[in-house]
Image (spheres, rainbow, N blue to C red):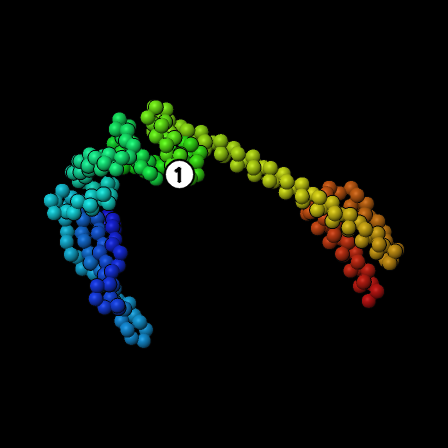
Amino acid sequence: MSRVIYRTRPFIPYAKYSKYWNEYIQEGDEIIKYVYNKVKLPDRELRNEIYSHEKQRWTIGDVNLPDWLYRYVVDDDLSNNGKKIVKQWRLDKYISDLNNYKEKGYFIDEEKKIVITDREILMFREDSEVPFWAKITSLVKDAYNRIRITPKFMELVKDDFENHKVDYEILCEMAEQNRKKNEEKEKEFLAKQQELQEKKDYEVAIQLFLRLQKNLVDIKPKLSEEGRKEIDNLLNLINKSEISRARYDILHQAGVEIILKEKSKRG
């Protein structure tokens, strides 16, 4: 399988009608660098032509493979040997990253492999075939039922880790509990909104029924004897009918038909 694992931003080194960028393609254990050139031909149609060519090719573990590319390698596409090489690289990089985070003064829990920066919470996951740094900031926000990251909140999380109040498993449990609570709150909110809407619809329907009754009573004397009987029957039906907008529409249409029939008789 071939996939783009990294693409540079386009740059314009020469003419304004020409743009260049690089794409790094992973094919199994191989990484291929392609150079792309988009040329806008300044004719009437302003046609765009894109050219590309292979610039370099490396195999995972190659000493010439740029170190930074390892972080973009897709683990699932690697062979077993490729996974071993990337795993070792990430373990070595973990030590380097940890020293870098220490120099910056970030909170570090080496036992739980947790790093808390100013804005992010990271966890080094070794429970996968190829270890990696996972951003668990969203999980932590869910666990504490927070929307935003603030310095005060980050201090709270640091304290809880330092005092062994939380770990990854506990955070997952807290997040799941909050998810269920929020789902229940959402259901209650929607049920209340539906109840309010139904109440509003009922009140509107009552007003429509009263107006329909009044209009029928007002027009009754102007109709023929047959028409007046039909109006009486309709009024009796309205009194016995359940109050709803759907029922009103049916009764209203019946009243319209009576009046139209009367008009047709008169020519």
Q: Quadrant of residue 84 in the image?
A: top left
Looking at this view, name the residue that lies furthest to the left: 63
Residue at numbered disc 1: 149
Q: Percent x, y for residue 117?
A: 31, 37
Q: Quick check: can you spot residue 46? A: yes
Density class for disc 1 (Cα within 10 Å; few <14, some 14-19, many ≥20) is some
Q: Percent x, y for residue 6?
A: 25, 50
Q: Is residue 212 left or right of residue 81?
A: right
Q: Is residue 159 left or right of residue 51?
A: right
Q: Quadrant of residue 188 in the image?
A: top right
Residue placed most toward the observer, 182 or 97: 97
Q: Percent x, y for residue 52?
A: 21, 61
Q: Percent x, y for residue 254?
A: 75, 53
Looking at this view, name the residue that lies furthest to the bottom: 44
User: In the image, what residue occupies the spot 80% across and 53% down?
Assistant: 215
User: In the image, what residue occupies the spot 12% across and 45% down?
Assistant: 62
User: In the image, what residue occupies the spot 34% across and 39% down?
Assistant: 119
Q: Quick check: can you spot residue 139? A: no
- Kind of residue indicated by mark 1: Ile
Residue placed most toward the observer, 108 or 200: 108
Quadrant into which the C terminus falls = bottom right
Q: Quadrant of residue 120 in the image?
A: top left
Q: Is residue 53 left or right of residue 230?
A: left
Residue placed most toward the observer, 65 or 248: 65
Residue placed most toward the observer, 88 or 115: 115
Looking at this view, name the residue that lies furthest to the top: 164
Q: Is residue 102 above or below residue 63?
A: above
Q: Is residue 241 above or below residue 42?
A: above
Give SS at disc 1. Answer: loop
Q: How many marks?
A: 1
